[in-house]
Image (spheres, rainbow, N blue to C red):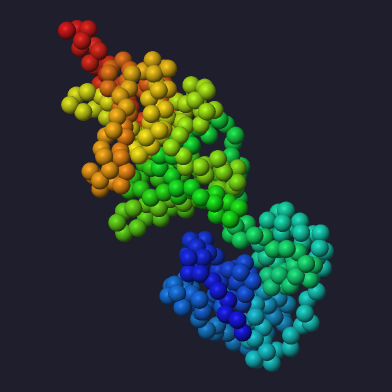
Amino acid sequence: MKKIIISRKKLVRLYEDKQLSTYTISKILKCDPTVIQKRLKEYKIEIRYPKKAIKTSKKLLENLYINKGLSTYKIAKIMNCGPRTVYSKLVKYNIKTRPIKRVPIQKERLIDLYHNKKLSYSKIAEKYSCSPSIIFDKMKDHKITTRSLSEACTIYPKKDFSGYLIEKAYLIGFRLGDLNVKRDHKLIKVKTNTTKIEQVNLLHGIFREYGKPNIKEDKNGVFRFEILLNKSFSFLLPKKDNVEDWILRKDKYFLAFLAGYIDAEGNIGVYSSRARLRIRSYDKNLLRITHKKLKTLNIHSIYKLEAIAGKYNQNQDMWGVSINKKQDLLRILKLIKPFMKHQKRCEDLKTAEENILLRIRRNKNG
């Protein structure tokens, strides 16, 4: 028999990251659950709930199955095991089994529940008081195609992007600054690592209405944020050192974009009693375009090479845009303030504003 090839990466994603059962994974990959269990052992992936021997008496089974008339599926739920385990116990104790239940479910109804309503085999089985395997067999009998891997792994509903261009501009700015985005079958996977809880809270607040965020913290205090979004978020896929034309055409879109980029890569602070805004990154062209756009808003900024490749162990040249003069800084902070979302950046912005206004008052009084 030909060995079924399942990569360790895929198994980790389905079993550990998605927390799917070996039974569900076997249905997705069209193999027997024992194959999945063997691969878990081969790859030394810790099994969540090691299989234990089911201890039950003949008397208990007779009471549940014969007296109460429960199905093997319902008994399995009570005993926390599979329906086949219950059936094997019935045979072992010579308990006469009932004829196989015929599930009266039409093809159209099954298509509606599975493809339109996106119910799993187990959820459909609950409606008909049978085991998921019976639903799976019905699917094969009716020649109903199973959902793709990405659809099958979609436990939580995915909501379409709102379509608001200000939100879109902000997200693109933040993505170019600090997010890793790629396709995951028919879905869009967004992820990042950070040590800052404010960053985690920001990402959770941005994306939670569109899907189910997955957040984990390792022993070193690094948070891993990951979320699967539907294809309406494909605009986040491009990673280009550029600012799109539609963003530059309207000031409000540019300011939202800039706020997103600052939330990800920027720094607003008070140094030697003077407020400053600085953005540093490898995105030379993006920062050059930002510098030129700020000029059209009557804001003076400095655009320059901050550090050559290798100086701080980075493999690319580091470029920067900074705004230091009081009036220019006060103006840009006022313009981006409505679009900022990062808690720490918002607090720093407020501190910078207070510093500038204090210096202006001192100059007037002096």
Specify the quadrant of the image occupied by residue 360. top left
Q: Is residue 292 visible?
A: yes
- Does residue 285 lie above or below 160 as drawn? above
Count of all numbered marks drawn on residues in the image: 0
- Does residue 228 lie above or below 66 as drawn? above
The x, y position of residue 166, in whole percent, is 52, 29
- Does residue 215 lie above or below 359 as drawn? below
Q: Residue at point 68% right, 77% down?
A: 72
Q: Residue at point 51% right, 79% down?
A: 38
The x, y position of residue 34, in whole percent, is 57, 79
For this view, does 86 lie left or right of residue 220?
right
- Does residue 160 lie above or below 327 as drawn? below
* Residue occupying the far top of the picture: 365
The x, y position of residue 177, in whole percent, is 40, 39
The x, y position of residue 107, in whole percent, is 81, 63
Q: Is residue 205 visible?
A: no
Q: Residue at point 52% right, 22% down?
A: 250
| Foreground of the two, 234 or 72 | 234
Quadrant of the drawing holding the N terminus: bottom right
| Foreground of the two, 184 or 162 | 184
For this view, does 108 lie left or right of residue 175?
right
Quadrant of the drawing holding the C terminus: top left
Q: Residue at point 54% right, 51% down?
A: 183
